[in-house]
Amino acid sequence: MMQAIDALLEAVGPTHDDRQSAMLEHAVAEGFPTVGPGAGRVLRLLARLADAREVFEFGSGFGYSASWLARGMSDGRIVLTEYDEDELALAREFLDNAYDVTFAFESGDAMAAVERYDGPFDVVLLDHEAARYAPALARVRSKLRPGGVVVADNVASGPVDTEALVAMLGAESDPETHRREASWDVDTTTEGAAAYLGLVRADPGFETTLLPVEEGLAVSVRVE
Ligand SMILES: C[S@@+](CC[C@H](N)C(=O)[O-])C[C@H]1O[C@@H](n2cnc3c(N)ncnc32)[C@H](O)[C@@H]1O
């Protein structure tokens, strides 16, 4: 069933452009974890719906997710952040002069880079380490314009223990407190996803849903 759905999603499109095909080939050859084409299409649509002009990514790798966001924009800027200098150099190669937007390449810790930008951001992608999604949201929250969108990748499956996550989020107290009380032994990604989802769903400033695309996208729109 999932394979049929994936094929259907691909058939509905949009498809990769030539550059993105080369990027995905590279990701497969290197075993590099991109958001994947399904999530990429969602990013493009969200950028389009938000009429995005200013976008910030936490964790950009070699620029695959940024290429999808760029394809949903007709103008503006995307800030890419990446620890790994080689990945960022490759992002420059793939993206420079490729789309109708400007790219800013920030080497080093995304959590520090975001402090150098005032926003207001129209779209923010969290795709660095799930354990740091909640602190990243805290840093970027006031810089997101009303109507702006935050997308968090890898929050439902893949590296996440989905059953533990459901149990943690079903708890009445906040997920982190409950985990300590119940002494759940979960990995840091699951713990990070629970902390993030717990935070964003409790925030009256956001409306959030989870799209079961690729490894799970939490999509939150700033409503106040
Ligand atoms: C899942 S990959 C990003 C993939 C990219 N968004 C895409 O779909 O093409 C995560 C990347 O975040 C980087 N990273 C992790 N923590 C980071 C941080 N605090 N600051 C900057 N980069 C970070 C890693 O080096 C890795 O390349």
Image: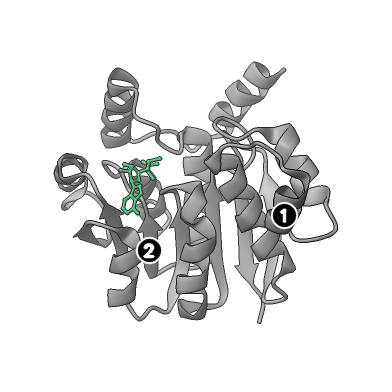
Color theme of the render? one colour
Q: Residues within 10 Å of mark 1 (few under 14, many from 20)?
A: many
For label 1, the SS is: helix
Q: Quadrant of residue 159?
A: top right
In this view, the residue in front, 21 or 209, is 209
Image location (x, y in percent) of residue 55: 39, 65
Image location (x, y in percent) of residue 122: 47, 70
* Above or below: residue 56 compared with residue 90: below
Foreground mark, 1 or 2, reads: 1
- The quarter in which the N terminus is drawn is top right
User: In screen coordinates, is 206 left or right of 33?
Assistant: right
Label 2 amino acid? Phe
In this view, the residue in front, 224 or 12, is 224
Q: Is residue 76 visible?
A: no
* Earlier residue among tags 1 and 2: 2
User: In screen coordinates, is 63 left or right of 13?
Assistant: left
Image location (x, y in percent) of residue 19: 26, 35
Residue at horizontal 34 percent and vertical 29 percent from the top: 32
For label 2, the SS is: strand
User: In screen coordinates, is 22 left or right of 196?
Assistant: left
- Marking on residue 175: 1
Residue at horizontal 40 percent and vertical 46 percent from the top: 68
